[in-house]
Amino acid sequence: MTVQVNPEMWLARGDALVPATFTITRDGMKLGGNGTGSPQGDPPVSFDLSGAVLSNNFFLLKLRVPATGNCAVNGVMILQGVGSLNPVTRTGMTFTGSALEGDCTHMVVRAGLTKQP
């Protein structure tokens, strides 16, 4: 499944919108994948993700995003949260998560995602 963040539905608090594209693969109850985010004015950032399926439409995700600063762990910021698929169309996803950024501030993200062909 590849999903694209729809900037009109991006509800993260921050200085700029960060469109992202990522691919999620499922192997039994495990999820894996990778993606790219494009912060405004900065080069694209690649990240890895992993997770677990809790039910057919509900899962946990962890994104490992490169970061610097006092709170970055081994050069990454870990954003984790829960996601759910629209059980009818299975083309929409809602993701809610949080992270401790490299500069030790807290980030909360809520994104509406749509599956791309």
Image: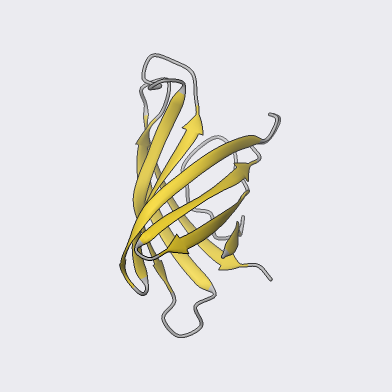
Count of marks, rendered view? 0
**Residue 115 in picture, x, y percent from top left:** 59, 68
Instruction: Tell me, yes or no, if residue 56 can be seen here.
Output: yes
What residue do we see at 51% from left, 60% from top?
25
Query: Which residue reaches farthest top?
Result: 70
What residue do we see at 43% from left, 62% from top?
27
Residue 113, placed above or below residue 72: below
Query: Quadrant of the image for the C terminus?
Result: bottom right
- Quarter of the image for residue 94 reads bottom left
Query: Which residue reaches farthest bottom?
Result: 88
**Residue 32 in picture, x, y percent from top left:** 47, 52
What residue do we see at 49% from left, 34% from top?
65
Residue 86, placed above or below residue 13: below
Left/right of residue 18 with respect to residue 76 in the rendered view: right
Query: Quadrant of the image for the N terminus?
Result: bottom right
Q: 89 or 31: which is nearer to us?
A: 31
**Residue 48 in picture, x, y percent from top left:** 51, 41
Query: Which residue reaches farthest left?
Result: 54
What residue do we see at 68% from left, 35% from top?
44
**Residue 100 in picture, x, y percent from top left:** 35, 30
Query: How are the colours assigned in the image?
Result: secondary structure
Instruction: Tell me, yes or no, if residue 18 can be seen here.
Output: no
Query: Which residue reaches farthest front?
Result: 28
- Quarter of the image for residue 43 reads top right
Q: 77 or 108: which is nearer to us?
A: 77
